[in-house]
Amino acid sequence: MSPNLWAGVGLVRSGAGTALVGDPETVAERLRAYAALGVDTFICSGYPHLEECYRVAELLFPALGLDATQQSGPVGEVVGNYTPPSSRTSSSSTTSTTPSM
């Protein structure tokens, strides 16, 4: 389907999925190509999870010109686990059960 794209992820786990495969420079090149097409979010994961996190941070991030030690803000599970929901303010004393969108 595309260079360095492996669609066999579904053979090793349930659900659909594809993976970019190759050395860090090759994967970085493919990610930049997708970004040039307008893709702005990537899920960089692998198996086993912890080891792959280190591999991505140590090998792929530098190939993309990213510094894994510099974060611009909370990301990933930090957002889900530690960012409290914003409080709602109301001009009346009644409580609404309709969520704000």
Image: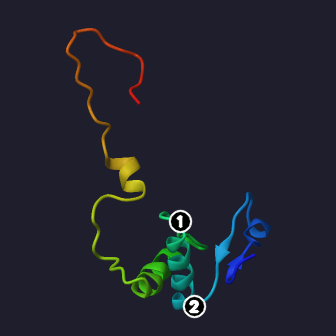
Point 30% across, 76% down: residue: 69
Q: Secondary structure at mark 2?
A: loop
Residue that extends furthest to the left in the rendered view of this protein: 91
Residue 8 appears left or right of 37? right
Q: Residue at x 29, y 68 (%)?
A: 71
Q: Nearer the viewer, residue 78 or 94?
A: 94
Q: Quadrant of residue 54?
A: bottom left
Q: Considering only vertical position in the picture, is 80 above or below 29? A: above
Amino acid type, residue under disc 2 in the picture: Asp
**Residue 27 pos. (x, y %):** 56, 83
Query: Residue 1, located in which quarter of the rendered image?
Result: bottom right
Q: Is residue 35 above or below residue 95?
A: below
Q: Give the side of residue 12 with respect to residue 49, left or right.
A: right
Mark 2, Cα crowd under 10 Å, few <14 / some 14-19 / many 20+, is few
Q: How far across and how far down the image is residue 58, in percent?
A: 42, 85
Q: Position of residue 89 (x, y in %)?
A: 22, 23
Q: Is residue 70 above or below residue 39?
A: below
Question: The residue under label 1 is which amino acid type?
Answer: Ile
Give the label on residue 43, or none: 1
> What secondary structure is marked by label 1?
loop
Q: Mark number for residue 53?
A: none
Tell me what residue is drawn at x 22 percent, y 10 percent.
92
Q: Which residue is mark 2?
A: 23
